[in-house]
Amino acid sequence: MGLPTVELSALASVVLVAWVGFAAHRASLCTVRAVAEILSSGTAWMLASFAKAALWTLAVSGLVLLLSPLSGAPVQQTLPHAVALAGGLVFGIGAALNGGCSLSTLQRLADGDLSMFGTLAGFVAGVFAWSMLNHPLELTTLTTQAVLWDRQSIWAAPVLILIWLWGVREIIRLWRPTAEPTAVSALAALRQRLSAPVYRLSSSAAILGVAGGVLYTVQGAWTYTNFLRAEAVSWQGAGVAPSTLHGTLLVALLAGMVLSSLQRHSFALQFDWRVCAGRRVAGGLLMGVGGAVIPGGNDTLILAAIPTLSPWSLATYIALLTGVAAALLAMRAFTGLQLRVDCTGDRCH
């Protein structure tokens, strides 16, 4: 007897999220590092990979929504939009102070940096603090974000075709072998690429985007920052608690990262209480406030909100990048320290 459709969907979602965690860890994807690359090296390889991830999510989710009866799980947005922009700015400042964005926090935790528990605790505290302020005063409201993939739209299909033309070209570029392959060498090449200690940015972007596109259609804003936000808000009775499956997806995301860390032997337990009590908690607190307002984090914006084609989601992400840049420049001015990221050949060091 086969599994019910709902259980199959849940199982597939868990596997996809674990795959996302593995790939994100292999490329060390991080919005803070993306901005630092621009400021220190004048290149934007990592930021371009985030744009590619959003395009892949858009391509997959758009295809599914246009060709199937699915309408897509809802994604929330904050009104008024100006407050959401401020939330993005605050989140970016907090991420820079923390030394990593939402995905990077879990990546470093998966590598054994226990100080990142301070970031997660600060994030939950920040969400809780904003909820305490916002719930009685009603400074903002959450509304369902419209999905612009309208089956009746005359431009939806042409735009989707253009995106998929880019996608096919990207697949060919990523898979292009260095020599004439055989069936055995092709399989060996695939195994070698999957076990590579560092993934190409474009490869990780494709994995994140394709998996994110499928997850968006069945789970909506599935990201872990959105889970932490919803969980903290529910403690005050100001929102519905996230589902057990949503919590399981968080565990799967971290498990995929831990598997990557163990497989490439980068796991090493470390803890500095001074860093944890200082930058981690403070940065996490600001990220939590920003995440409560957005709602979610940079992962939610890239893999769920921006693919709805909402201009405000894109504007919020730009505000987040601005916050990261402002904080990094301020820290460099006051401390003389600069986070340097060098990226060449679609890989970062």
Image (tube, grey):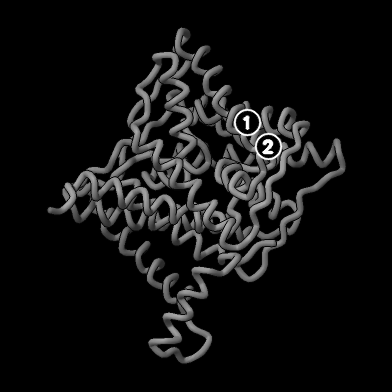
Q: Nearer the viewer, residue 262 or 328?
A: 262
Judge left or right: residue 53 versus residue 154. right
Judge left or right: residue 312 versus residue 163. right
Q: Does residue 246 sit above or below 175 in this rendering? A: above
- According to the picture, the residue beneath numbered tag 1 turns out to be 284
The disc, 2 or 1, on the residue closer to the chain's N-terminal end is 2
Q: Could you tell me which secondary element the residue under label 1 belongs to?
A: helix
Q: Could you tell me which secondary element the residue under label 2 belongs to?
A: loop
- According to the picture, the residue beneath numbered tag 2 turns out to be 115
User: Percent from the top left, x then y, of residue 146?
Assistant: 31, 37
Q: Nearer the viewer, mark 2 or mark 1?
A: 2
User: Percent from the top left, x then y, of residue 167?
Assistant: 40, 66
Q: Nearer the viewer, residue 139 or 120?
A: 120
Local crowd at mark 1 within 10 Å, few (<14), some, or many (≥20)? Answer: many
Q: Nearer the viewer, residue 273 or 326?
A: 273
Point 66% across, 34% down: residue: 93
Local crowd at mark 2 within 10 Å, few (<14), some, or many (≥20)? Answer: many
Point 45% across, 75% down: residue: 190
In the image, what residue type sits under mark 1? Gly
In the image, what residue type sits under mark 2? Ser
Q: Does residue 44 sit above or below 226 in this rendering? A: below
Q: In the rendered image, which quarter is residue 63 located in?
A: bottom left
Q: Nearer the viewer, residue 240 or 143?
A: 240
Query: How far, Cα to Cα, is label 2 from label 1?
Result: 11 Å
